[in-house]
Image (tube, rainbow, N blue to C red):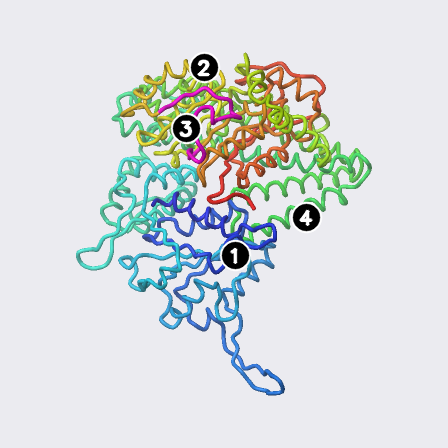
């Protein structure tokens, strides 16, 4: 399998091994928790995915290479101890704790994490003296007398014998204690990772045209090995970026240090020289500034296709960096704003900065130190946190310099400093948006539809650009996004900046989220349908709720569709409330000829319209057959569409969910139709405090999906009740209650809700592989 599939297998296994029953005991006893054994060629990302799994699950990781361990270091050193049994005294040998097991206790003390992955690399290269002890370890998770602590899952990795002369092939007795996962190099999976990381475009564009160069290991005629690995390409991309920034040359000698195959190193060195020439000749900065001359445009028009694609990648690379800088700055501002919200009441009430803000800064620094010590903190998270702490310290220093160290005066000083920081965000976002406009203009003027499709597709797969459009909007993107016009609803620059700026008006103290309030919400919304079902009125109530309702042109029409594209090929996917089917058309293209895309909606007229466009959609997508199915059904009753239990790999639901008759029941239906390990992609809205029931009822009647939102806690409780795992937040951003389907469109709102703030979120939620949540 490829590395992405292997990662999911590991993640599912770790979650299963960590599950506990109501008595706190493992659902799978440690003796039956077979360690996973990743077996694959070197440099394909085995270690990297272990760190990703630990980070995504919020657990720790301790890594050891077994190649240097002897029996003594793994099992511990012998010592003489005195003992007595019924008056009989004797001396015996006893082993100190294994270095590996001791490292787990050190890690837990240092980081505070009590669960994690013990990752043993090169497991099939253990020394001859240690090999006999591995059977005991693999089954009983002990070295000598010392057991791996509860809450730690063992994962192993190794290379096949053809890549490593030190490898011992495991016998059947050993293999029967492992879950072997054979991993193959796969360019498509690596490309998704490379795009996510923003690796240098010279590497990604070269490999896009020469995929046969992605991974290669073969014997040289004169002895030795010629090889190229995914790790080598990634490391090369990083060093190229640093050398360019420092003005250092990137030549064949440098390339050969990472690409250990002479022919491929030669090819890339030549390609990079051309790449540099394109960058210089085409003046990418001038293109994005809208100042490119006619000579450059004419050359672009006459360039061969591969040169055009290289230029598109250059433009996108610079554009993605611009968008990422704005988003990074916004993340810092939002985190700082949340801290100031928490401090406001105490400061205005007379407390000092030293007693309120400074301790919170210290708490953030300590939390960051623990994350760094755990080895699972993403570099982007560490960077953001350090900038947040630095900015908060600046605010505290500003109070000291202004001699406003306590009370409302201190808060006023902080607020002015915060506004200054926010004021710099809007022009940066406007500049990035203008560069995106200019990029669209250049591609429009110089290239044809083929290049524009490549540009749009690449823009949509780069997280910085898609998130920027989601947060700030871009009219050029909306105008060119013909396939999904409803995807054009995002916040405008001025609106977003105003939401960030005014602390006095925008900061609201978090109100207590009591169980009584949640219970009241459950009775008024979730429990209402349950009671009606008991009275036999369910079908009638559903029909009355949805009859005549369209819920279009508000925020309900926003379908961001932040999809794991690499996971969808060949899968069965369901779009709940698909409306006129455009999202299903897009999903049909993604799942391909071997997959199926389903769409359900309560509006029969919409379903008929979707069916009318179905044939054209699959033909335009280049499919060999129709792979789409449309049915009429309510989201709370998918069985009415003939969708059986455990039949879907992926279910997608957008922001209209807050207007469903019964959200909790709809989520339970999503869980029912998903296969074990299936993925729910949920776009919804979170309110920052418990809701006024009258406001929610009127908002639902009005069709305002934002004002109909519930809190994060309520949504997570529904997901837990449906049997889902902990959600992963893929994207989030603030929205105003009046937000419509695009930046310049507003909808009617319900009065009496002015102190509530809303966040649009995109969630990935897995259905457990077996059973459900304990």
**Residue linked to disc 3:** 459
Question: How many residues crowd around disc 1 within 10 Å: few (fewer than 14), some, or many (20 or more)?
Answer: many
**Residue linked to disc 1:** 152
* 630 in the magenta segment: yes
The image position of residue 59, as x and y in percent, is: 54, 50
Above or below — where is 354 with respect to 747? below
The image position of residue 272, as x and y in percent, is: 30, 39
Select label 3 or label 1 by which is in front: 1
Above or below — where is 65 with respect to 704? below
The mark nearer the N terminus, 1 or 4, is 1
Q: Identify the residue at image location x=41%, y=21%.
A: 630
On screen, residue 280 versus residue 363, left or right, reads: left
Judged from the image, the secondary structure of the residue bearing numbered disc 2 is helix
- Contact between labelled residues 3 and 2, with CB atoms less than 8 Å apart: no
Select label 2 or label 4 by which is in front: 2
Q: Which residues are magenta?
A: 628-650
**Residue linked to disc 4:** 362
How far separated are the C-alphas under marks 2 and 4? Answer: 55 Å
Question: How many residues crowd around disc 2 within 10 Å: few (fewer than 14), some, or many (20 or more)?
Answer: many
């Amino acid at each position: 399998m490829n590395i992405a599939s292997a990662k999911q297998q590991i993640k599912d296994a770790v979650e299963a091994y960590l599950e506990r029953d109501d008595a706190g005991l493992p659902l799978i006893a440690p003796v039956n928790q077979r360690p996973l054994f990743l077996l694959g060629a070197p440099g394909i990302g085995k270690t990297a995915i272990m760190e990703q799994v630990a980070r995504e699950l919020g657990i720790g990781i301790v890594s050891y290479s077994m190649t240097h361990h002897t029996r003594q270091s793994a099992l511990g050193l012998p010592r003489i101890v005195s003992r007595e049994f019924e008056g009989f005294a004797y001396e015996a040998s006893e082993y100190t704790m294994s270095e590996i097991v001791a490292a787990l206790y050190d890690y837990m003390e240092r980081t505070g994490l009590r669960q994690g992955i013990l990752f043993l690399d090169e497991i099939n290269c253990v020394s001859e003296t240690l090999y006999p002890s591995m059977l005991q370890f693999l089954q009983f998770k002990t070295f000598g007398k010392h057991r791996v602590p509860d809450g730690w899952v063992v994962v192993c990795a190794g290379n096949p014998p053809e890549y490593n002369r030190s490898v011992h092939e495991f016998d059947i007795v050993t293999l029967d204690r492992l879950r072997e996962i054979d991993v193959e190099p796969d360019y498509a999976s690596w490309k998704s990772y490379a795009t996510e990381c923003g690796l240098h475009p010279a590497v990604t564009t070269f490999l896009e045209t020469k995929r046969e160069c992605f991974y290669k290991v073969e014997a040289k005629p004169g002895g030795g090995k010629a090889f190229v690995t995914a790790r080598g390409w990634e490391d090369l991309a990083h060093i190229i970026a640093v050398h360019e920034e420092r003005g250092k040359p990137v030549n064949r000698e440098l390339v050969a240090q990472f690409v250990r195959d002479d022919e491929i190193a030669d090819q890339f060195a030549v390609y990079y020289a051309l790449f540099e020439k394109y960058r210089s000749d085409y003046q990418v900065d001038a293109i994005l500034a809208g100042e490119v001359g006619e000579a450059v445009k004419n050359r672009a028009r006459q360039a061969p296709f591969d040169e055009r694609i290289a230029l598109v990648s250059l433009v996108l690379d610079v554009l993605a960096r611009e968008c990422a800088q704005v988003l990074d700055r916004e993340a810092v501002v939002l985190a700082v704003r949340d801290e100031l919200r928490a401090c406001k009441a105490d400061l205005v009430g007379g407390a000092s900065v030293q007693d309120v803000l400074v301790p919170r800064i210290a708490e953030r620094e300590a939390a960051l130190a623990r994350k760094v010590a755990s080895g699972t903190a993403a570099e982007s998270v560490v960077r953001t946190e350090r900038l947040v702490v630095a900015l908060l310290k600046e605010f505290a220093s500003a109070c000291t310099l202004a001699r406003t160290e306590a009370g409302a005066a201190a808060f006023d000083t902080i607020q002015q400093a915060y506004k200054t920081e926010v004021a710099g965000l809007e022009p940066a976002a406007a500049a990035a948006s203008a560069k995106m406009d200019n990029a669209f203009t250049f591609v429009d003027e110089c290239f044809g539809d083929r290049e524009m499709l490549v540009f749009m597709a690449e823009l949509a797969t780069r997280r910085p650009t898609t998130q920027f459009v989601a947060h700030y909007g871009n009219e050029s993107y909306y105008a060119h996004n013909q396939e999904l016009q409803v995807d054009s609803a995002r916040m405008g620059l001025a609106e977003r900046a105003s939401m960030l700026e005014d602390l006095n008006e925008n900061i609201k103290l978090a109100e207590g989220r009591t169980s009584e309030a949640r219970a009241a919400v459950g009775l008024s919304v979730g429990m209402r349908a349950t009671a009606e079902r008991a009275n036999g009125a369910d079908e009638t109530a559903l029909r009355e709720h949805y009859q005549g309702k369209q819920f279009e042109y508000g925020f309900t029409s926003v379908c961001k569709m932040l999809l794991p594209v690499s996971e969808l090929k060949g899968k069965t996917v369901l779009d709940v409330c698909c409306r006129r089917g455009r999202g299903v058309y897009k999903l049909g293209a993604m799942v391909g000829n071997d997959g199926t895309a389903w769409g359900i909606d309560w509006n029969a007229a919409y379903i008929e319209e979707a069916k009318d466009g179905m044939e054209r959609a699959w033909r335009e997508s280049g499919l060999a057959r129709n792979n789409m199915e449309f049915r009429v059904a309510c989201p709370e009753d998918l069985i009415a569409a003939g969708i059986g239990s455990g039949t879907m790999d992926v279910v997608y639901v957008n922001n209209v969910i807050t207007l469903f008759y019964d959200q909790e029941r709809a989520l339970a239906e999503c869980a029912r139709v998903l296969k074990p390990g299936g993925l729910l992609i949920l776009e919804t809205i979170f309110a920052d405090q418990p809701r006024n029931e009258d406001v929610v009822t009127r908002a639902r009647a009005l069709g305002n999906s934002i004002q109909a939102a519930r809190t994060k806690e309520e949504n997570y409780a529904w997901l837990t009740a449906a049997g889902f795992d902990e959600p992963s937040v893929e994207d989030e951003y603030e929205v105003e209650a009046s937000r419509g389907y695009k930046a310049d469109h507003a909808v009617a709102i319900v009065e009496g809700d002015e102190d509530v703030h809303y966040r649009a979120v995109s969630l990935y939620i897995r259905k457990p592989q077996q059973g459900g949540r304990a």
